[in-house]
Image: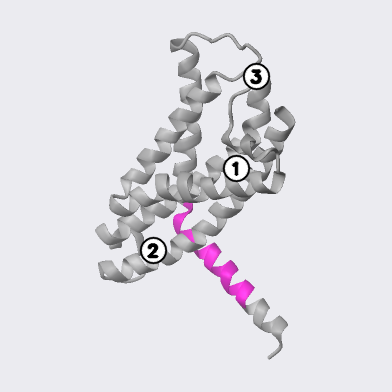
Amino acid sequence: MSMHVILDGIIVARFSSCLAVFYARGKLLALMNLAFFGCVFVTVVVSEFLIPPQPYLGSYPSFPEISFNFDFPLMVFSIFLFNLFVSAFAVVTLPGFVFFPLSTVFLLFRAVVWGLLLHYQPTWVFLIVVPTLVLEGEAYCFAAVAGTVAGASWIKPEWLFCDGKFSRVEAFKRALRECLVIYVFVALFLFFAAVLEAATLTIMV
């Protein structure tokens, strides 16, 4: 058997597993997107009425990434790792392992914080950062799905897997395999978001 055939088989298997996860968790992902981006929008709109506008003095916010002296690859690498392991996994996914609704709670908390931050930004900054926010936000929605699936698997396996009766341990192992597939997309979204964010910082400052 040639190496090309083996690689094709691996790619097809991975693609099939991705499709299976999307088919099984598509509605949950759609709900996370609706909740997250809807919460950002509502927070911005409500802030316009409840929080008085602050004068924009033309100064730039302080970003930790700027300390890398605009070494673009290093900025991308640092932003990507921080968002993947801290913002996505530790803050959004991991709490769901303990109690699955916590992933949604922390996702919505992040949405409120983003909405408040966007409220204070001038229009031109808002327009520049929107592509980065969309990519990061989508990554966090995927991360919330991963935490919800993993946490629900050991509490109520029948909620997740309708193709058979599994013990909590078996369901958790199966959910972890789904999480690995989901985190491929989390990593991809966050990588492209890190590239955009580093480029934006380089242009703005």
Q: How many marks?
A: 3
Splitting the image into 4 quarters, where does residue 129 fall? top right
In the rendered structure, which segment of residues is drawn in magenta? Answer: 10-26
Indicate the secondary structure of the residue bearing disc 1. helix
At x 34%, y 50%, the residue is 96
Horizontally, residue 96 falls left or right of residue 40, namely left
The residue that label 3 is drawn on is: 123
For the residues labelled 2 and 1, the Cα–Cα distance comes to: 24 Å
Asked if the residue under mark 1 is in contact with the one under mark 2, i.e. CB atoms within 8 Å, the reply is: no
At x 33%, y 65%, the residue is 172
Dot in front, 2 or 3: 3
Res 29 seen here? no
Splitting the image into 4 quarters, where does residue 57 fall? top right
Horizontally, residue 169 falls left or right of residue 137, namely left
Q: Is tag 2's residue or tag 1's residue first in the polypeptide sequence?
A: 1
At x 46%, y 46%, the residue is 86
